[in-house]
Amino acid sequence: MKLIKCPTPEAVAQQAAQFVIERINAKPAAVLGLPTGGTPLGMYAELAKAVREKRVDMRDITTFNLDEYCGLPPGDPQSYDVFMRSNFYMPCGLNPPQSHIPNGNAADPDAEALAYDAAIRAAGGIDLQVLGIGHNGHIGFNEPGTPPDSRTQAVQLTDKTRQANARFFSTIDDVPTRAITMGIGTILEAREILLLVNGADKAEILAATLRGPVTPDNPASFLQNHPCVTVIADAAAMP
Ligand code: PGA
């Protein structure tokens, strides 16, 4: 894995945006896998600025998001669909046919998951998958115990993940218990992976991800088996 250490989360955002911009400029019809969460917010703001300043053209890209909660009403402000609309699709001028996110309200979540993997394949596979990491090592919503060959599927969220995400909801009881997530196998099929990590509270899991055993106990450790991973982290996460 290639490691890039930045002094601050702002510098991580700039480096990450530059990384994505270079990939799109090299391949204007690039297929991107994208995360939600607090970590990528700065990168999305930098990408929107780059679009405004015409440093990148996103008209021909296709995007697939990692995951979506199950059971939130359509348009719920905490849904990842709304997150992506506000922070990326609208500011960067992406149109609905270009941008994909699992439907957390699908009547048949298993069929939705199968169709999602098929859509990624039909688009030619993911050129660059951007990831955050959970404190428990989850990537997407692949919680500890998930095998490395898992495909996109409906999953149960751990208490740790629900507690970490409760900051976005009124109460912990409002945090959904299930989600549809790309599988670890799906993620590892991306031709290139960019992992973003900020904060001292992620230092331990990042060290385990880079140097610890490759084990389902830390789903992110499977990134060690991928030939083309770059990690951009701030100084607090990579002391
Ligand atoms: P965060 O979430 O960016 O909000 O820390 C990361 C994750 O849970 O994957």
Image (tube, rainbow, N blue to C red):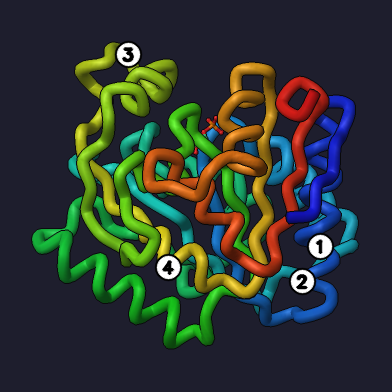
Residue 226, image x and y in percent?
60, 65
Answer few, some or many: residues within 10 Å of disc 4's Cα (few below 14, many 20 plus, some between 14 and 19): many
Dots 1 and 2: beta carbons under 8 Å?
yes
For image coordinates 63% across by 74% down, the residue present is 191
- Between 198 and 39, the residue placed more toward the observer is 198
Return the x and y of residue 30 as percentages of the image width and height: 67, 77
Gap between marks 3 and 4 measured at Cα: 32 Å
Q: Which residue is mark 3?
A: 170
Q: Does label 2 or label 3 sit earlier along the sequence?
A: 2
The residues bearing labels 2 and 3 have C-alpha atoms spaced at a distance of: 38 Å
Image position of 32 with respect to 202: above or below: below
Instruction: Tell me the residue that label 2 is attached to.
Output: 24
Disc 1 from disc 2: Cα separation: 5 Å
Residue 186 shows which numbered tag?
A: 4
At 32% across and 13% down in the image, what residue appears? 170
Residue 33 falls in image quadrant: bottom right
Direction from residue 215 to residue 190 in the image, left or right:
right
* Distance CA(mark 3)–CA(mark 1): 36 Å
In which quadrant is the C terminus drawn?
Answer: top right
Seen at 42% across and 68% down, the residue is: 186
Q: Which residue is mark 1?
A: 21
The amino acid on which the numbered mark 3 sits, given as a three-letter code, is Ser
